[in-house]
Image (spheres, helix red, strand yellow):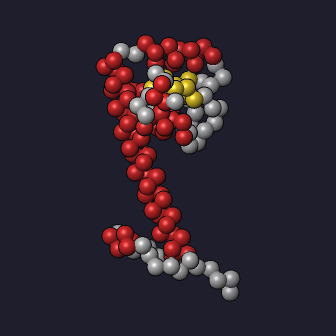
Amino acid sequence: LYSAADVVISLAATDSFPLTMWESFAQGRLLVASDVAGVREAFAPEDRWLLATPDDPHDVARALRAAIDVDSVQRAAVLNRFAQAALRWAEVDTEMQWLGTLYDATLNNRPLPTRALDYDVVFSCTRTTGR
């Protein structure tokens, strides 16, 4: 679906981790999105003209018209910043998954995965036994 779209619209009233946003960024699509916490922070300041107040149809129309009318040079710059944001998110997501694996192994007294030996940080865990 993303490949068929010129612009993706995601107008949730609240959305702390908008998957549609990250998918749009990764697919190289302009996104008109809600100007709410969690979304706003993912947009570079110079791209926040694509954000709209979700319950204000005039503001949504303004952002959508701007996204449709953007010139090719600015569009390419925005999409490049979106791609960089998507890559940063993927790196964070990968690290969070890794830390979850490490945490699970530690809590369940399983051997640490080999990658744990690559870390320069010593992890210390205390288990509560209920005594």
| Left or right of 35 in this view: 27 | left
Instruction: Give the x, y percent position of residue 126.
Output: 55, 78
Disc tally is 0
Q: Is residue 95 visible?
A: yes
**Is 3 above or below relative to 97?**
above
Image quadrant in which the C terminus is located = bottom right
Furthest toward the right, the residue is: 130
Along the horizontal axis of the image, is 42 left or right of 76?
right
Say which of 12 and 115 sits in front.
115
Q: Position of residue 20 (x, y in %)?
A: 54, 36
- Residue at 63% x, 16% y: name it: 57
Residue 118 higher or lower than 70, as above or below: below
Residue 127 position in % (x across, y down) = 58, 79
In the picture, residue 77 is in which quadrant?
top left
Q: What percent of the width, then of the height, locates residue 28?
A: 41, 31
58 lies above or below 80 = above
The residue under the point 52% across, 30% down is: 1
Please give the name of the residue rendered at 42% of the width and 73% of the height, measured from the top-left corner: 113
Q: Is residue 121 visible?
A: no
User: Residue at (63%, 32%) from the top-left corner?
Assistant: 12
